């Protein structure tokens, strides 16, 4: 009797709970091993993002090429044509940002260098890169980065006046600062004369700036996240110093 009473007075020792195992979706491979799928809330693999980036780069390189189909227009006896392809460069920077925009322009120029007649007027090949317009082509690479860098700091609001200034700074000022001196050096034209001659491009380029900003504003409203918003360097420094 006492042994039974003694046994009933002892409570069972508590056992440690087993660690929770996150729910996963499993499948069976052909060899019988279990394949565990990623969690629904897990971050997406980088491969998908990379494929999307490459697709966007290719699309805008194709857009720049397509804008050369209307042909080239030479005004005032200049050796550099008026072309719609500058609009494609501006759009690449304002919609894709600095990195992807730069890659799209670089891809387009690489195809031109390979011999494809993608420049306005059906021009292509390495001879283009020793001609009078090579400075403007190099200016595209700088201009698209400037536009993309500034656009990232204007988002998510992307106010039209500031966007017009940013696009003009990259799509006109940066391109002209490289294109005009190189044109003058190759053709032997005095720099001031070359600068005055380049003003023939200005009205059309200003119109392209307006079109770019209006299109980019609509795109960023419909598909936010194409460009990750960035803060201005001085604001970042101020935040760091205030935190210290």
Image: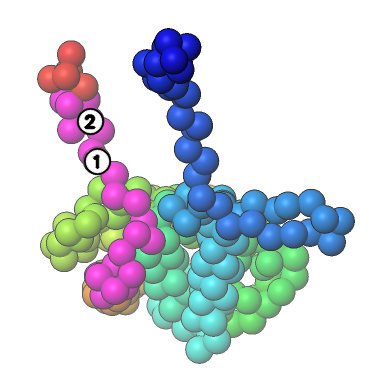
Q: Which residues are magenta?
A: 216-239
Residue 36 as seen in the image, left or right of residue 60: right
Q: Residue at x 49, y 81 (%)?
A: 67
In the image, farthest residue toward the bottom = 70
- Say whether marks 2 and 1 touch (CB < 8 Å): yes
Residue 176 among magenta residues: no
**Label 1 Cα crowd, 10 Å radius (few <14 / some 14-19 / many 20+):** few
SS type, badge 2: helix
**Element at badge 1?**
loop
Give above or below for 230 relative to 5.
below
* Above or below, 97 relative to 11: below
Instruction: Give the mark nearest the N terminus, 2 or 1.
Output: 1
The x and y percentages for residue 48 are 57, 59
Q: Position of residue 92 (x, y in %)?
A: 43, 65
Mark 2 highlights which residue? Answer: 236
Residue on which disc 1 sits: 231
Given residues 198 and 56, the one toward you in this image is: 56
Task: Specify whether residue 238 is painted magenta.
Answer: yes
């Amino acid at each position: 009797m006492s042994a039974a009473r003694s046994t009933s007075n002892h409570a069972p020792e508590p056992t440690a709970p087993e660690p929770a195992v996150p729910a996963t979706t499993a499948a069976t491979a052909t060899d019988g091993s279990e394949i565990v799928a990623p969690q629904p809330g897990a971050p997406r693999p980088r491969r998908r993002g990379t494929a999307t980036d490459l697709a966007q780069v290719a699309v805008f390189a194709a857009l720049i090429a397509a804008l050369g189909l209307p042909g080239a227009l030479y005004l005032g006896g200049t050796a550099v044509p008026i072309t719609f392809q500058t609009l494609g460069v501006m759009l690449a920077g304002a919609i894709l940002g600095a990195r992807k925009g730069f890659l799209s322009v670089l891809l387009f120029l690489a195809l031109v260098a390979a011999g494809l007649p993608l420049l306005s007027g059906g021009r292509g090949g390495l001879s283009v890169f020793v001609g009078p317009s090579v400075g403007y082509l190099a200016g595209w690479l700088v201009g698209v980065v400037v536009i993309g860098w500034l656009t990232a700091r204007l988002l998510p609001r992307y106010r039209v006046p500031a966007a017009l200034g940013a696009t003009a700074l990259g799509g006109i000022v940066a391109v002209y600062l490289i294109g005009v001196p190189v044109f003058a050096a190759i053709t032997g034209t005095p720099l001031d004369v070359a600068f005055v001659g380049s003003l023939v491009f200005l009205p059309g380029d200003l119109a392209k700036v307006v079109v770019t900003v209006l299109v980019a504003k609509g795109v960023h409203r419909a598909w936010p996240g194409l460009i990750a918003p960035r803060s201005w360097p001085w604001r970042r420094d101020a935040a760091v110093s205030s935190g210290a």
